[in-house]
Amino acid sequence: MNPICKLFNIKYPIIQAGMVWCTGWKLASAVSNAGGLGIIGAGSMYPDVLRTHIQKCKLATDKPFGVNIPLLYPNIQEIINVVIEEDVKIVFSSAGNPATWTSILKAEGITVVHVIANTKFALKAQEAGVDAIVAEGFEAGGHNGREETTTLCLIPMIKDAVSIPVIAAGGIGSGKAMLAAFALGADAVQIGSAFAVAEESSAHRSFKNKIISAIEGDTRLAMKKLVPVRLLKNEFADAISIAESEGADRNHLMELLGKARAKLGMFEGDMENGELEIGQVSAMLNAIRPAKEILDEIWSAFKAECARLNNLPNELDF
Amino acid sequence: MNPICKLFNIKYPIIQAGMVWCTGWKLASAVSNAGGLGIIGAGSMYPDVLRTHIQKCKLATDKPFGVNIPLLYPNIQEIINVVIEEDVKIVFSSAGNPATWTSILKAEGITVVHVIANTKFALKAQEAGVDAIVAEGFEAGGHNGREETTTLCLIPMIKDAVSIPVIAAGGIGSGKAMLAAFALGADAVQIGSAFAVAEESSAHRSFKNKIISAIEGDTRLAMKKLVPVRLLKNEFADAISIAESEGADRNHLMELLGKARAKLGMFEGDMENGELEIGQVSAMLNAIRPAKEILDEIWSAFKAECARLNNLPNELDF
């Protein structure tokens, strides 16, 4: 049996990434009901809002689901308390040191997965006692590693370095890409952008429309002097790009970024002034559909591509 | 039969990339003799030097081999003349517009492949009449696309866009990565960095040693304001990195780059002042070995991984 399906007790080794402003209880429960693992993204939620989402998610599905917690958030203790009080069984932690919180969560019987982008942090996460890791490549939306290692190069290195299961993330939005991740040694995939445009995603309709009309080269890894993040091109991203090209320092970038720009764009729908985080895979997304349809299509294509690849020994005569 | 094996009449769908200062007749003939397609890189050769390499390559192998020609070079007409006069059968063109030269080469009975990094140029190359294309992702060494699309995202898009065979490049130096490329729809792979450290590569021993000791994050895509190129970190790359971070313009970068820096580093072995072009895959390379050993290992691992993947339907119960 697949180690990730076993770890989470899910049908398909497909995990929906926790993403700010996109992944509330509606999306998480839809993905879990469809046989994947849905994740509520706590990154854009106050503790009370998160509590409500967890409660609603439990009412909407009897399948396993998780909560993603960026560990660097100022109200992290409160967020952890909510997760424990609400009896959440699975936590994906990211953006911070897993050493502090993993043992506390594990002591509560919670399965813990940590998101990393290089071997060093993969080993630290394993040492901290996490049950699995997500290895996220350069092409991913959201926050990315400074080494800029792509998923193709990252997954085999991480797989060689750790003994716990590895979930591949970054650039995966189709059955083909999912199969490529398995070819690289991944035990499962985490999919962000393709679920950000699901009907059940809480992203603003304008953001979803902008994602499905995006083409090649419409995203850029920006703000490397702060925390690297992949942005969809708009007035704000262009301003950042120009400032960076002229040598803007941290302070200048922080000033340009200001406050609450991700909410402004991704949740409130300001397509020019908002911060729009999305992966390179956006160039291949063309429709807003129910999460179940998205998941079913990826799974069907994965199976079909698997059958095609099973024919390689004949084609190549070995 | 595999379309690329058929097109070139080779045993394995593995092509050795033409790389400046690494790929003379010794490496090209070794790869061709081992059953792949060896390529002489004309990018670092005067026309007479290229002629000598072609002649020596013909003496060293009776198998097919090719010549890579960057189309933007000032002495391009002379290079094309040499290739035609020496009866070369396969040309890989790159860095320029294939519309000008493809029909001239095709009229001489030469098989033409063009290297691209986005859909727009893939379509242009197809329209120009090339027989296949190489699609090269962000993680590749050498010159890269401005869109920074990774191999994982690029290959399925290119495969959807064109009807001619697609050769995947960038991040491929192992059987696992080769299988991932096939999962993405590639018909063959082009491998650069892993052959740059072959014994038969004309790269300086110091450069080879630096490549095999490189770790994650030791390369960076640099000089995007000129022509993007992936550099191995050293004093020169650091100087470029600092200048870029401070907003250096084209002129400043050209001044820092100066003349003949690639030769100084890659061929003459100045590891601090030279320009060292290599892919992210360098982090996974650990030994200097004969080209045949490198090719055989990739092919064996590819077959083994293929067998592993053939078991996925059992593991995942479909």
Image: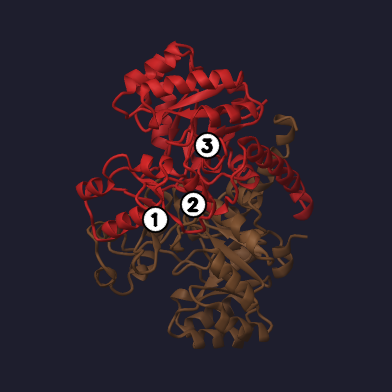
Chain colours: A brown, B red
> Looking at the rendering, in which quadrant would you find the N terminus of chain B?
top right
Secondary structure category for the residue under label 3: loop
Question: How far apart in space, not on screen, are marks 3 and 1 (Cα)?
Answer: 21 Å
Residue at 52% of width from left, 56% of height from top?
Answer: A170
Disc 3 and disc 2 in contact, CB within 8 angstroms: no
Q: Amino acid at mark 2?
A: Lys
User: SS of the residue at dot 2?
Assistant: helix
Q: Nearer the viewer, residue A119 or A298?
A: A119
In space, the residues marked 2 and 1 are separated at their CA atoms by 10 Å
- Chain letter belonging to callout 1: B
Which sits in the foreground, A204 or B311? B311
**Residue type, mark 1 in image:** Asn
Q: Nearer the viewer, residue B110 or B186?
A: B110
Q: Chain of mark 2?
A: B
Query: On screen, A267 above or below A310?
Result: below
> In the picture provided, is B130 more to the left or to the right than B184?
left
Which amino acid is tagged 3?
Ser
| Disc 1: which residue | B234
Q: Is residue B81 above or below residue B200?
A: above
